[in-house]
Image: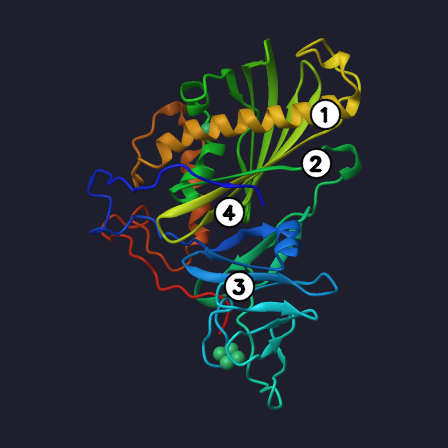
Amino acid sequence: MQKLRIVRNALQDVADDGERVGSQPALDPFPEGWYFVADRRSITKQRLIQKQWLGQDIIAWCDDEGAICVARSVCPHLGSSLSPEAGACVRDGLLVCPFHGFAYNAEGACVATPYAEPPKSARLSVFETREIRGLVFAWWGIEGRPPQWGLPEEPADEGDWSGMEMRTLRFPGHPQETAENSVDLAHLRYVHGYDSVGADGSVTVEGAHLVSRFDFRRRCGIIGFTSILEVSATTHVYGLGYSYVDIRENSIGIDSRMWVLATPVDGTFIDLVLVGQVRNIRTPKRFAFGLALLPVSLRTGLMSKMYMFMQERDVLQDVKIWERKSYRTHPRLCRSDGAIGKYRRYCRQFYPNTPYADRDHSRKPTRTHRSSAAD
Ligand code: FES
Ligand SMILES: [Fe+2]
């Protein structure tokens, strides 16, 4: 996988304005949902990866049939770490613990040991997984709850799209705060300098699926060419770890898509993974960036890189805000702040055990006890 970019190394204290409990953040750092683990290519290339994910160490690996297993990095036998650093490895399609050599299949069952019958009770603590376009997600359930809702089907038309560009930014933040940007249209003008920003219909919510549509114009300059892009975006939010944006640039005729995947690392930092693709641009509607002069594959590849560059630059503008902001349980909104209240109500389903201050003003939010997949 591409290099991780750590945007800020030290967490700066935010002003305590009475919306925090002691040093605890007002939002539980690990809301329920589907969160990105890694892309399949990285897992198969590295064979076994370990990472910190929602406050715990997990591993991901792939067996010989292509089945991916995501599990806690703890051997059920005597508790060894299952990380490559500890000496765990994938051998003959099985995960082998470095301590006594117990071997596990991709379903988490112990199927062999070097010196005895494998105990039936020895099972890895595995997470439910879903894969979309080679992006592997795992379900994080409060107190080990099974998935309460699903991720969408894969988007179609793979053959007509560029390869996937991927970037990862790490910074102090929270996935609810990053996903809130999809309904916070006012910041598009103020932070990113977009023009003519307008909602296209109202934000809709159906269970864990929130949809926000909006249009804007933005200036774009690259390698000496400058153009105005007229953009229509539809954001599909499925929980706080998965946002998918369909983006149509109307003046040149460029279709693109972007996944914005926020994953809590340790209760302070999050990884924000951006994944972008552009559809082949066969006949640009107008001459821009010298596109018409380039062969189709070259112009699509160029636009894909340029779009990712713009997205990353935009997100870095947001990061400056996110990493320093406080969560406002009772934001003082103005009439034009649109759907932020609706978004906050939508978010409550991802904290099933949290008493909310905005449900009951006399109660402060507390951190809930969490666990992952059943041990
Ligand atoms: S601790 Fe893993 S095999 Fe003993
Ligand atoms: Fe933004």
Q: Nearer the viewer, mark 4 or mark 3?
A: 3
Mark 2 secondary-structure assignment = loop
Question: CA separation, marks 4 and 3?
Answer: 26 Å
Residue 338 visible to an observer of this rendering:
no
Residue at the image position 42 percent from the left and 30 percent from the top: 318
Residue at the image position 21 percent from the left and 38 percent from the top: 15
Of residue 136 and residue 222, the one placed in the foreground of this image is: 222
Question: CA separation, marks 3 and 2?
Answer: 29 Å
Classed neighbour count for the residue bearing mark 4: other residues with Cα under 10 Å, few (<14), some (14–19), many (≥20): many
Classed neighbour count for the residue bearing mark 3: other residues with Cα under 10 Å, few (<14), some (14–19), many (≥20): some
Residue at the image position 50 percent from the left and 72 percent from the top: 374
Three-letter code for the amino acid on which mark 1 is drawn: Thr
Question: CA separation, marks 1 and 2?
Answer: 9 Å
Q: Position of residue 133 (x, y in %)?
A: 69, 46
Q: Earlier in the sequence, mark 4 or mark 1?
A: 4
Residue 163: mark: 2
Residue 102: mark: none
- 31 with respect to 44 (left or right): left
Query: Is the CB atom of the residue marked by disc 1 within 8 angstroms of ligand 2's nearest atom?
Result: no
Residue located beneath label 3 in the image: 84
Residue at the image position 51 percent from the left and 48 percent from the top: 239
Mark 1 secondary-structure assignment = helix
Q: Earlier in the sequence, mark 3 or mark 2?
A: 3
Of residue 94 and residue 190, the one placed in the foreground of this image is: 94
Three-letter code for the amino acid on which mark 3 is drawn: Pro
State the image quarter where residue 175 is shown: top left
Residue 241: mark: 4
Q: Earlier in the sequence, mark 4 or mark 3?
A: 3
Q: Earlier in the sequence, mark 3 or mark 1?
A: 3
- 373 with respect to 120 (left or right): left
Mark 4 secondary-structure assignment = loop
Q: Position of residue 161 (x, y in %)?
A: 74, 33
